[in-house]
């Protein structure tokens, strides 16, 4: 068996390169973001043995079932306009199966970005609605950095809610990260300035109502004062129209990336796609468990396609984790 890797700016382009170089019998083994974070890297394989000239020729790849993809997207409650574009693209891509066809379509319509690595040039500021899972996501980001033997600082702005400070303090102690408090934008700027320069800095904010203009203005002010890079934490499973409006509101505060939380408690992900597409947010990672030790799962087009396609049961998050890892 011959193995070869292909890097391209998009998944469909990489798939075409595989077919051009190895032919239609090539099997795509894995898909992951390119090392520079721009584009995608595929690993493909091809059996070395030559076919018997007198043996019956194997039929060409069975056509991808666009109907199966359409049924899955309908089940996921994907908005009609995005639904039509995804189906149109999936029907024209040279893919081996429904997963890769949908993955190629998703790669065309949505943005994906790698998980932030240490050291980060700017502090990461997690923003989102109340109960989205920002504190757990902040802890998971810090845990990932600590596992890479780097230092981290965790700054919390949630200094009023009962139990919030105790929770984040427990995370900081367990992860051995530096903890600071910042009640407002001015305190946040000072807290960031006090962090050691080699630290990966994560800011955990108070849950914000995306439809409260004053609250969103305070959030944008805090991000600007800290020189932070906002990342939206959005729970999976919401209504598509609501998720689009929420994502747009937080994108107006400067966010360019999105972490999906609570995918283990959702069965329909059309809202997640709607939010990312409407606001132009790059999908970075997902959380499939409330446990900090389970970490964050990186998003890529193939892992997202597996999440969207059958079977629609508890194994979806497991399939996502297997492909994303």
Image (tube, helix red, strand yellow):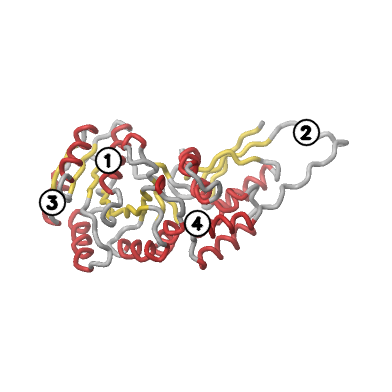
Q: Residue at x 22, y 48 (%)?
A: 203
Residue at disc 2, secondary structure:
loop
Q: How many marks?
A: 4
- Quarter of the image for the N terminus: give it: top right
Residue located farthest toward the right when viewing the structure as drawn: 54
Residue to which mark 4 is pinned: 76
Distance in Å between CA atoms under marks 1 and 3: 19 Å
Of tags 2 and 1, the one toward the viewer is: 1
The CA span between labels 4 and 3 is 37 Å
Q: Residues within 10 Å of mark 2 (few under 14, many from 20)?
A: few
Q: Return the residue at label 3.
A: 160
At which x and y percent is residue 18?
A: 63, 45
First in sequence, mark 3 or 2: give its number. 2
User: Quick one: label 4 or label 3, which is nearer the N terminus?
Assistant: 4
Which residue carries the number 2 mark? Answer: 50
Query: Is residue 90 something one can see in this rendering?
Result: yes
Which one is earlier in the sequence, the residue at label 2 or at label 1?
Answer: 2
User: Label 4 neighbourhood size at 10 Å, few (<14), some (14-19), many (20+)?
Assistant: many
Disc 1 or disc 3, which is closer to the eye? 3
């Amino acid at each position: 068996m011959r193995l070869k890797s292909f890097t391209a700016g998009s998944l469909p382009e990489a798939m075409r390169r595989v077919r051009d170089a190895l032919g239609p019998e090539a099997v795509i083994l894995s898909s992951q973001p390119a090392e520079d974070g721009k584009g995608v890297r595929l690993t493909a394989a091809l059996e070395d043995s030559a076919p018997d000239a007198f043996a019956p020729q194997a039929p060409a790849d069975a056509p991808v079932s666009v109907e199966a993809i359409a049924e899955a997207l309908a089940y996921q409650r994907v908005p009609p306009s995005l639904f039509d574009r995804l189906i149109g693209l999936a029907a024209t891509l040279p893919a081996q199966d429904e997963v890769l066809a949908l993955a190629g379509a998703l790669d065309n319509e949505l943005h994906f970005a790698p998980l932030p690595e240490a050291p980060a040039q700017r502090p990461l500021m997690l923003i989102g609605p109340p109960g989205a899972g920002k504190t757990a996501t902040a802890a998971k980001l810090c845990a990932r950095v600590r596992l890479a033997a780097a230092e981290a600082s965790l700054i919390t702005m949630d200094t009023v809610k009962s139990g919030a400070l105790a929770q984040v303090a427990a995370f900081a102690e367990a992860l051995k990260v530096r903890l600071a408090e910042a009640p407002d934008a001015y305190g946040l700027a000072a807290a960031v300035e006090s962090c050691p320069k080699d630290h990966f800095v994560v800011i955990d904010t108070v849950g914000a109502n995306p439809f409260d203009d004053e609250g969103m203005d305070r959030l944008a002010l805090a991000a600007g004062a800290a020189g932070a890079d906002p990342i939206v934490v959005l729970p999976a499973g919401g209504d598509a129209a609501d998720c689009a409006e929420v994502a747009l509101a937080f994108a107006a505060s400067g966010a360019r990336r999105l972490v999906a939380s609570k995918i283990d408690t959702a069965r329909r992900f059309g809202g997640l796609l709607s939010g990312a597409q409407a606001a132009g947010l790059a999908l970075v990672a997902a959380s499939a468990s409330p446990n900090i030790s389970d970490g964050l799962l990186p998003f890529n087009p193939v892992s997202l396609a597996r999440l969207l396609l059958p079977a629609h049961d508890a194994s979806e998050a497991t399939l996502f984790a297997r492909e994303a890892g």
